[in-house]
Amino acid sequence: MEQLLSIFVRSIFVENMVFAYYLGMCSYLAVSKNVKTALGLGIAVTFVLGCTLPINYLLENYVLKEGALSWLGSEFESINLSFLSFILFIAVIASFVQLVEMIIEKFSPSLYASLGIFLPLIAVNCAILGGSLFMQQKEFPNLGEATVYGVGSGIGWLLAIIGMAAIRERLEYSDVPKPLKGLGIAFIITGLMGIGFMSFSGLKI
């Protein structure tokens, strides 16, 4: 349990997808103008990460990497399908994104309209694919740890985009210098928030 809690907290604060690795910045900057819209996209990203990362973990460990097919018999032990990992990971991600898109369109048309092109673009959001690639790199020993890492990474991205949206809503009433309005001030705030999140780098559980 302590290990799971450590992975969860680290994935949110220490290894935050936005502030530690600057992944998923396109949708992070484009959709973080309104808290409600940012919340919707953040929940969608968390759901996709939480669902796809354990599936990709199973694919990695029981289908793709060298020796993963040994459960089929000793003659399959030498097979290495890791060159297919990008294609299969993205296929799994795209399937879940399509599911999320249909659900949001059905139950929240206003959110679907406000997210626009950035909802289907979750399929190629580098934060989502990055989660699966980091899972490969970290070589988690079991499915539980991989799932916790996926959910934590999603929540970290959610907190980042909600925090950014809340600040940008406040900035509408602030006297921002004209050359910095829009993306200029957004980049500055992102950098400052990244520095703030660096304070968690020494956190140990």
Image (cartoon, helix red, strand yellow):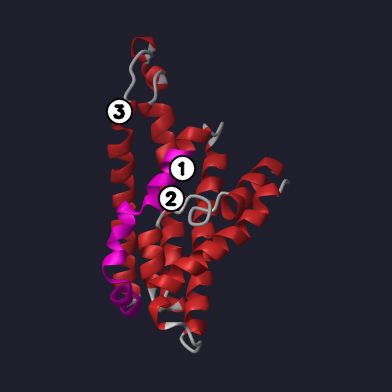
The mark found on residue 51 in the picture is 2
Which residue lies at the image location 31% right of the left edge and 37% below the top edge?
86
Residue ID for mark 3: 83
> What's the CA distance linking mark 2 and mark 1?
6 Å
The mark closer to the camera, 3 or 1, is 3
Q: Nearer the viewer, residue 128 or 97?
A: 128
Residue nearer the viewer, 8 or 18: 18
Q: Position of residue 144 (x, y in %)?
A: 56, 41
Helix, strand, or loop for circle 3?
helix
Residue shown at the point (72%, 46%) measured from the top left: 204
The dot on residue 54 is: 1
Number of numbered discs overlaid on the protein picture: 3
Q: Position of residue 25 (x, y in %)?
A: 40, 59
For residue 21, above or below residue 88: below
- Name the outermost residue toward the top: 75
- Give amino acid for label 1: Pro
The reply to whether discs 2 and 1 touch (Cβ–Cβ < 8 Å) is: yes
**CB within 8 Å, label 3 to label 1:** no
Question: How far is the residue under mark 3 from the one under mark 1?
Answer: 19 Å
Label 3 close to label 2 by CB (< 8 Å): no
Q: Is residue 114 magenta?
A: yes
The magenta region covers 109-134
Residue 38 visible to the viewer: no
Q: Position of residue 83 (x, y in %)?
A: 30, 28
User: For the residue labelled by badge 1, is the local secondary structure a helix, a strand or a loop?
Assistant: helix
Q: Residue at x 34, y 74 (%)?
A: 107
Side of 99 relative to 158 (left or right): left
Identify the amino acid type marked 3.
Phe
